[in-house]
Amino acid sequence: MTLGCGGMLLATASGMRTLPTALVAILLASTAVGCVASEGDSSFTIANRSSYFLEEIHIAEVSDPTWGPDLIAGALAPGQDLTIVGIDCGTYDVLVVDETGVDCELSNIDLCFDDDAWVIDDFTLDVCAFNAVQ
């Protein structure tokens, strides 16, 4: 999966202090050389409105049997947002894991020339916890 300018995945988080130095350097370098997502690229925002820290966030094309890398270093705190930009046109699955180990998956997100968002609240995490395959 190729995401972002020059094949790089770019993610930003509002109010997030845990972005790794390397990611900040990539973001600044991309801005400095005028790297702009093309018209056809999409973005996806995960808004954490739960009472829990989100420890992992992964995205993968639906056809990919494995998850992509964890997109956050540390955690996404309650009230914070993570925006993934420069996503190539396609259909994706998104996986988040909260601090209690609950996996929550959003399947078949069509991100072709569009921006989308997923608000995760306590109800969403409860539904995922109760629907987990035992």
Image: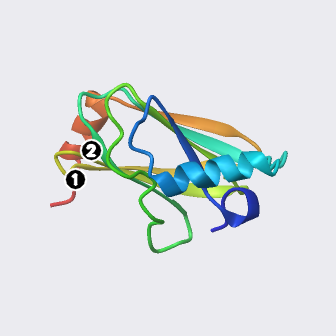
Q: What residue is disc 2 on?
A: 128
Measuring from the top left, give residue 125's x and y in whole percent: 27, 38
Residue at point 62% right, 56% down? 91
Measuring from the top left, give residue 53's x and y in whole percent: 27, 38
Residue at point 55% right, 64% down? 62
Task: Locate the C terminus and report the quarter of the image it occupies.
Answer: bottom left
Residue at point 27% right, 44% down? 128
Q: How is the protein colored in the picture?
A: rainbow
Residues at marks 2 and 1, CA–CA distance in whole angstroms:
6 Å
Residue at point 55% right, 41% down? 12
Q: What residue is disc 1 on?
A: 132
Residue 130 can be seen, yes or no: yes
- For disc 1, the neighbor class at 10 Å (few under 14, some 14 to 19, many from 20) is few
Residues at badges 2 and 1 in contact (C-beta under 8 Å)? yes
Which secondary structure lies at badge 2?
Answer: helix
Furthest residue in direction bottom, as rendered: 65
